[in-house]
């Protein structure tokens, strides 16, 4: 998948930004993983301090998708660690955006995927299996739908209703 510069995409798609077909996530995410830029169709997940469904989804073939996890912005535990980062890489996921925390930062930084998260936290999450897959989620005032497209690079993160041309 070709890399699309988010700044250039904003400049050339002003009408899509104005209509809301392309949205910019607020600059609240830290950059992790070896892939500084990544993109793909979105798979959504809504959980809170519980990462059982994160693992279950990452165990499926990623096929270049991006897992967007609405963890409610919790800063009390990590939803993704090094093992899940490696699993995502092995299963062909392009990356993850976590509205919450990650841990095992050095391990995740060694993975050939892109990861964005609010922060790192050393404590692991609960394991109850509670959450929802493939549902509309809300991150920092932005609604994100399963199947939309995500584009991330060092400048920021875009959500688009459709695939944008490079």
Image (cartoon, rainbow, N blue to C red):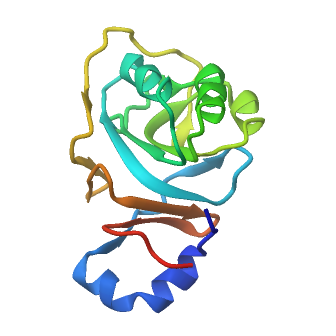
User: To which quarter of the image does residue 19 belong?
Assistant: bottom left
User: Residue drawn at (45%, 75%), measured in percent from left and top?
Assistant: 164
Q: Is 9 on the left or on the right of 14, as rendered?
A: right
Residue 66 in percent (x, y) is at 48, 47
Q: Is residue 118 above or below residue 101?
A: below
Residue 116 makes an appearance in the image: no
User: To which quarter of the image does residue 6 belong?
Assistant: bottom right
Residue 61 in percent (x, y) is at 50, 33
Residue 14 in percent (x, y) is at 38, 90
Residue 17 in percent (x, y) is at 33, 82
User: Residue drawn at (29%, 49%), measured in percent from left and top?
Assistant: 146
Q: Is 93 on the left or on the right of 33, as rendered?
A: left
User: Residue drawn at (26%, 39%), measured in percent from left and top?
Assistant: 134
User: Residue drawn at (33%, 59%), measured in percent from left and top?
Assistant: 148
Q: Is residue 20 above or below residue 92?
A: below
Q: Is 49 on the left or on the right of 67, as rendered?
A: left
Compare residues 7 and 95 and report the one nearer the observer: 95
Quarter of the figure with the C terminus: bottom right
Compare residues 19 and 57 and report the one nearer the observer: 57
Counting the numbered discs, the total is 0
Quarter of the figure with the N terminus: bottom right
Q: Is 153 on the left or on the right of 163, as rendered?
A: right
Residue 96 makes an appearance in the image: yes
């Amino acid at each position: 998948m070709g890399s699309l510069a988010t700044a250039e995409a904003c400049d050339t798609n002003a009408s899509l930004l104005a209509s809301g077909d392309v949205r910019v996530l607020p600059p609240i995410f830290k950059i992790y993983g070896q892939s500084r830029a990544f993109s793909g169709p979105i798979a959504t997940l809504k959980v809170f301090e519980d990462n059982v469904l994160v693992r279950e989804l990452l165990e499926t073939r990623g096929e270049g998708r991006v897992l967007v996890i609405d963890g409610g912005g919790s800063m009390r535990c990590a939803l993704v660690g090094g093992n899940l980062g490696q699993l995502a890489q092995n299963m062909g996921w392009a990356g993850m955006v976590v509205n919450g925390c990650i841990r095992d930062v050095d391990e995740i930084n060694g993975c050939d995927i892109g990861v964005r998260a609010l922060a790192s936290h050393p404590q692991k999450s609960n394991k109850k299996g509670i959450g929802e897959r493939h549902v509309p989620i809300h991150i920092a005032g932005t609604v994100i739908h399963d199947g939309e497209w995500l584009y991330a690079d060092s400048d920021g993160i875009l959500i688009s209703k459709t695939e944008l041309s490079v």
